Image (tube, rainbow, N blue to C red):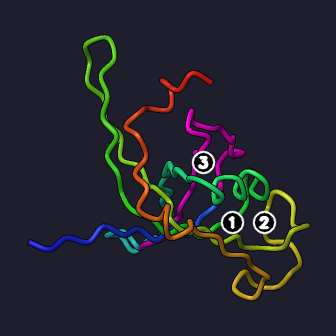
Amino acid sequence: MASFNRVILLGNVTRDPELRYIPSGTAVTTLGLAVNDRYKNSSGEWVEEVTFVDVTLWGRTAEVATEYLNKGSPVFIEGRLRLDSWEKDGQKFSKLKVVGDRMQLLGSRGGGGGGGGGGRPATQQPSSQYSQPDDQASYDAPDVPDNDIPF
């Protein structure tokens, strides 16, 4: 049976990204992303729903995210879903995350925390696009929960 695991997200960063390096020297950062959805409920009222997603970025993409993204910055992420599972004190935990393969910065450089910046719609803002090199595009992160990394 065929399968397809791709995720496309456009949202705002919920906390400043923090850059770390694993023992092999590869950069990694995890950032929170808030993605909004708006729909009408059964009584015809508009309902705003926010979904919070953890995104992990690797390599140069992680370094660029840490350098240019702040809390509130708009960003486009393309990646894949990954289920992290671990056991702590005899109890099993799991969390669905996104491993970002591509990131596109939205908004202007001087836009500040709001990310909107210069008054033009976000689709017309200057943007930069970063993705992992082909030799690391299929790199699979080790199964280590963030709280077990010793730094």
Callout 1 secondary element: strand
Q: Amino acid at mark 1?
A: Pro
Q: Is residue 21 left or right of residue 137?
A: right
Label 3 with label 2: CB-CB less than 8 Å: no
Query: Which quadrant: the C terminus?
Result: top right
Q: For the point 68% across and 42% down, which residue is it? A: 19
Q: Choose the circle earlier in sequence order: 3 or 2.
A: 3
Question: Within the image, what quadrant is residue 74 found in?
Answer: bottom right
Q: Choose the circle earlier in sequence order: 3 or 1.
A: 3
Q: Position of residue 52 (x, y in %)?
A: 50, 51
Q: Nearer the viewer, residue 14 or 4?
A: 4
**CA–CA distance between discs 3 and 1?**
12 Å
Is residue 135 covered in magenta?
Answer: no
Give the residue at mark 3: 31
Query: Which quadrant: the N terminus?
Result: bottom left
Residue 9, compared with residue 127, is above or below; it is: above
Q: Amino acid at mark 3?
A: Leu
Q: Residues within 10 Å of mark 3 (few under 14, many from 20)?
A: many
Callout 3 secondary element: strand
Q: For the point 72% across and 45% down, which residue is it? A: 16
The residue stretch that appears in magenta:
13-39
Is residue 16 covered in magenta?
Answer: yes
How many numbered discs sit on the rendered protein?
3
Find the residue positioned furthest to the bottom.
124
Give the residue at mark 1: 74
Q: Amino acid at mark 2?
A: Gly
Residue 115 is labelled as 2
Q: Nearer the viewer, residue 119 or 94?
A: 94
* Magenta portion: prevailing SS class: strand
Q: For the point 79% across and 61% down, which residue is it? A: 114
